[in-house]
Amino acid sequence: MSDNNMSSQKSEHHAHMETKRELVISLIMITCGAIVAAFSVEEFLSPNNIFDGGVVGVSMIISNLTGIKLGILTVLINIPFLIIAWKSIGHVFILKAGYAMALFSVCLGFFEDLPPIVTEEQPILATAFGGVLLGIGVGFVLRGGGCLDGTEIVGILINKRFSLSVGNVVMIINIIVYTAAGIRFGIVFGLYSMLMYFISSRIIDMIEVGLEQDKSVMIITEHGELIADEIFRNFGRTVTFIHGEGFISGTEKDVLYCVITRAEVHDFRTLITDLDYSAFTTFTDVAEVIGHKQH
């Protein structure tokens, strides 16, 4: 066997192992997320008539009115969405979503038999802690590549045919759910539910983006090479060079671009100011970084 063939097989084996490793990590995240989300719903939200949005929210309302177990309703209502989406959306996503929904429903049944942590006399605590825990749970499920609610699948399908974004579709559905909850159970519970949804949405964003959000830096200077050398020496990062020209002065400018962590912003700003006080520097939040920061 030639060295090239052996190297190719090793590379393919490594790629396969990486894929399996990523799958295991995603399943662990989905599992933990589904358990935490179910715990939040049964121990904080449902006992206090605080409703989630989407399919889970609809299931909570129906369960409250009919006495049908919440875990059974969430499965039954979500199944049609999974079937419809099977041919339109990636199978891996649907399988992960199905696993997340099934586990979520099982956990709802398990936690239903436990006494609620927060009673009806403490709706603010139920709203706050329920929203935080629900956001953590849903955030981990989404980061693992799955989802707990069929409304997200509806949003994806509608987005494929119309100009509405997934977020707008989910928001419209949730407004309908919260309006129904407010009409049936009182405006106060509808408002608590909306507040809980806002809290959980912010937590979901934090989980998806990450607590250590990176910053992209763009520096416009006439001393590009000097600053690039110092950035590499102090922070261990290279930069991308873009050559530009001042509109009024007509002088050539170096535009440097790199990504740093939030913790490095202060030292980075100090370094640039010391090297070129007239440099124009901008810092921008980065939602996600794919690849290496050294480029």
Image: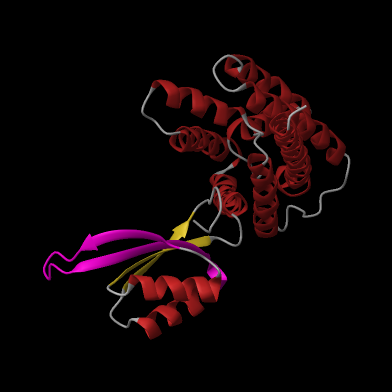
Percent coordinates x, y for residue 261 in the rendering: 55, 66
The secondary structure that most of the magenta stretch takes on is strand
Q: Quadrant of residue 41?
A: top right
Percent coordinates x, y for residue 220 in the rendering: 30, 68
Q: Residue furthest front?
A: 2
Judge whether 90 appears above or below 11 on screen.
above
Percent coordinates x, y for residue 267 in the rendering: 50, 79
Percent coordinates x, y for residue 285 in the rendering: 46, 60
Q: Residue at x 43, y 77 (%)?
A: 269
Q: Residue at x 83, y 39 (%)?
A: 112
Please give the range of residues in magenta.
239-263
Q: Nearer the viewer, residue 56 or 241?
A: 241
Relative to 223, is 195 on the left or the right? right
Q: Please say whether residue 68 is visible from this viewpoint.
A: no
**Residue 254 is covered by the magenta coloring:** yes
**Residue 78 is covered by the magenta coloring:** no
Identify the colour scheme used: secondary structure
The quarter in which the N terminus is drawn is top right
Q: Please say whether residue 205 is visible from this viewpoint.
A: yes
